[in-house]
Amino acid sequence: MAITKQTVADKIAAYLHHEITLAQLVDWAELALMEGELAEADASTLSAVIARLGVADVRTFGLAWEDCESLLSQLGFSSRIDVVAV
């Protein structure tokens, strides 16, 4: 199954929602680059975004909210924050 922009956006969203850890996101990105079949029409964008996610565990790169926002934008998505009482 091809990796699409939606696939990558879903992974970023899962990280932002604390459904997966940074380590899990990085592992997925590394595996996706090595073995994943990228949607042909978006291969350039997908490989750039996934490559960036793959180095997010390196202190020099990290992964801040602004990074996630930018990566989602490159994929054609926007992000928003909802603050709710618990």
Image (spheres, helix red, strand yellow):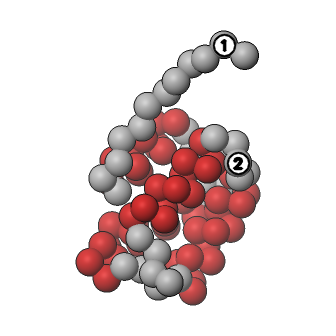
Q: Could you say which is closer to the camera, residue 55 or residue 20?
A: 20
Q: Residue 37, can we see it?
A: yes
Quarter of the figure that contains the C terminus: top right
Q: Which mark is residue 19?
A: 2
Residue sticking out furthest to the left: 41
Please identify the quarter of the rendering in which residue 35 is found.
bottom right
Amino acid under disc 1: Ala
Q: Residue 58, can we see it?
A: no
83 sits to left or right of 4: right
Which residue appears at 42% of the width and 37% of the height? 79
In the rendered image of this protein, does residue 64 appear above or below residue 4? above
Of pointers 1 and 2, the one earlier in the residue sequence: 2
In the rendered image of this protein, does residue 30 appear above or below residue 64? below
Which residue appears at 30% of the width and 73% of the height? 42
Q: Could you say which is closer to the camera, residue 65 or residue 15?
A: 15
**For numbered disc 1, what is the local secondary structure?**
loop
86 sits to left or right of 1: right
Which residue appears at 39% of the width and 64% of the height? 5
Amino acid under disc 2: Glu
Residue 8: image location, x then y, percent? 48, 62
In the rendered image of this protein, does residue 5 appear above or below residue 72? below
Q: Could you say which is closer to the camera, residue 86 or residue 43?
A: 86
Mark 1 or 2, closer to the camera: 1
Residue 33: image location, x then y, percent? 53, 78
Residue that numbered label 1 is attached to: 85
Residue 32: image location, x then y, percent? 56, 76
Which residue appears at 49% of the width and 27% of the height? 81
**For numbered disc 2, what is the local secondary structure?**
loop
Q: Which mark is residue 74?
A: none
Q: Could you say which is closer to the camera, residue 74 or residue 56?
A: 74
Please identify the quarter of the rendering in which residue 54 is found.
bottom right
How far apart marks 1 and 2 lie (CA) works out to 20 Å
